[in-house]
Image: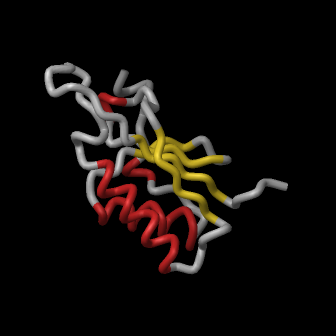
């Protein structure tokens, strides 16, 4: 039995401004991480859903990057509203937020 129902990692990797890949932190992932953590607490899901910062998830070109386990679904939330949509879809409805999923085959 897993320790958490869902484990969510949000990249907060920082690179130099001249790196052509950019970085998730530069694209606002730090604020999105803080918002996601706050919402999990507000929803009373601490201990069931774990939000963690992550180093580079190697999805920089899609960033901010986020991965949810055990589902192994990768998202690219750009706004707090995107985080809300993902949390509502995943947690409240046990569905995917399809429009925010990273399509690695299409976007490689």
The x, y position of residue 57, in whole percent, is: 46, 32
Q: Quadrant of residue 16?
A: top left
**Residue depicted at x 44% and y 24%:** 105
* Residue lying at the far left of the rendered structure: 18
Number of callouts: 0
Q: Quadrant of residue 81?
A: bottom left
Vertical side of 72 occupied by 37: above or below: below
The x, y position of residue 100, in whole percent, is: 38, 49
* Residue lying at the far right of the rendered structure: 1
The x, y position of residue 4, in whole percent, is: 70, 59
**Residue depicted at x 22% and y 40%:** 26
| Front residue (pair 76, 52) | 52
Vertical side of 51 occupied by 44: above or below: below
Q: Relative to residue 7, is residue 5 drawn left or right? A: right
Vertical side of 43 occupied by 69: above or below: above
Quadrant for the C terminus, please: top left
**Residue depicted at x 48% and y 41%:** 54
| Front residue (pair 106, 22) | 22
Q: Relative to residue 70, is residue 63 drawn left or right? A: left
The x, y position of residue 6, in whole percent, is: 64, 57
Quadrant for the N terminus, please: bottom right
* Coloration of the structure image: secondary structure
**Residue depicted at x 44% and y 47%:** 10
């Amino acid at each position: 039995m897993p320790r958490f129902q869902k484990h969510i990692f949000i990249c907060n990797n920082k690179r130099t401004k001249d790196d052509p890949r950019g970085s998730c932190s530069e694209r606002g992932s730090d604020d999105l991480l803080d918002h996601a953590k706050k919402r999990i607490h507000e929803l009373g899901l601490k201990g069931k859903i774990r939000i963690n910062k992550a180093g580079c998830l190697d999805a920089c070109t899609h960033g901010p990057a986020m991965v949810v386990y055990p589902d192994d679904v990768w998202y690219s939330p750009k706004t707090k509203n995107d985080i809300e949509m993902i949390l509502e879809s995943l947690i409240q409805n046990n569905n995917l937020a399809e429009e925010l999923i990273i399509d690695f085959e299409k976007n490689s």
